[in-house]
Image (cartoon, rainbow, N blue to C red):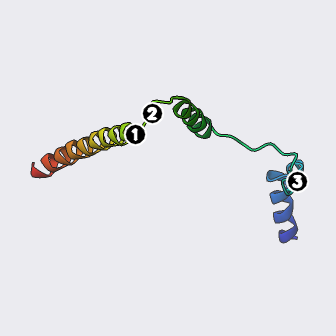
């Protein structure tokens, strides 16, 4: 009797939600369109722009890479200097 009341009480407070239809999983085929993210779209557009410019050279690419990495290393150095000054206090 006590056990039956317990189940009645639990059924009353936690009624079963309406069953939702679960999505069906299937294997992708040739007719499915690939998902393209914003990053992938930007990357392909940048690649297309750089490919169209005929004066783009390896030297220019290396120079831009060096400038970019110097900026990153300077930012890391400033952050490390700020962290060290906090530890010194």
**Pointer 1 with pointer 2, Cβ within 8 A:** yes
Q: Residue at x 28, y 39 (%)?
A: 71
Q: Where does the image place residue 6, in percent across and percent down from the top left? A: 81, 64
From the viewer's perspective, tell me whether residue 24 is left or right of residue 86: right
Q: Residue at x 20, y 42 (%)?
A: 78
Outermost residue on the left side: it is 89
Check disc 3 and report the residue beneath it: 24
Q: CA distance from mark 3 to mark 2?
A: 49 Å
Quarter assignment of residue 62: top left
Q: Where does the image place residue 16, in percent across and percent down from the top left? A: 86, 53
Check disc 2 and report the residue beneath it: 56
Is residue 2 positioned above or below 68 on the image? below
Q: CA distance from mark 1 to mark 2?
A: 8 Å
**Which is closer to the viewer, label 3 or label 1?**
1
From the viewer's perspective, tell me whether residue 58 is left or right of residue 32: left
Check disc 1 and report the residue beneath it: 61
Q: Secondary structure at mark 3?
A: loop
Q: CA distance from mark 3 to mark 1?
A: 47 Å
Residue nearer the viewer, 22 or 80: 80
Q: Where does the image place residue 37, in percent across and percent down from the top left? A: 64, 39
Q: How many marks?
A: 3
Closer to the chain start, of discs 3 and 1, is: 3
On residue 45, the disc is none
């Amino acid at each position: 009797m006590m056990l039956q009341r317990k189940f009645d009480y639990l059924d009353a407070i936690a009624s079963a939600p309406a069953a939702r239809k679960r999505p069906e999983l299937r294997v992708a085929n040739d007719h499915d369109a690939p998902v393209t993210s914003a990053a992938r779209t930007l990357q392909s557009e940048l690649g297309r722009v750089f490919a169209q410019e005929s004066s783009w050279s390896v030297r220019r690419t290396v120079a831009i890479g060096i400038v970019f990495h110097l900026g990153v290393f300077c930012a890391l150095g400033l952050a490390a200097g700020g962290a060290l000054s906090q530890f010194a206090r």
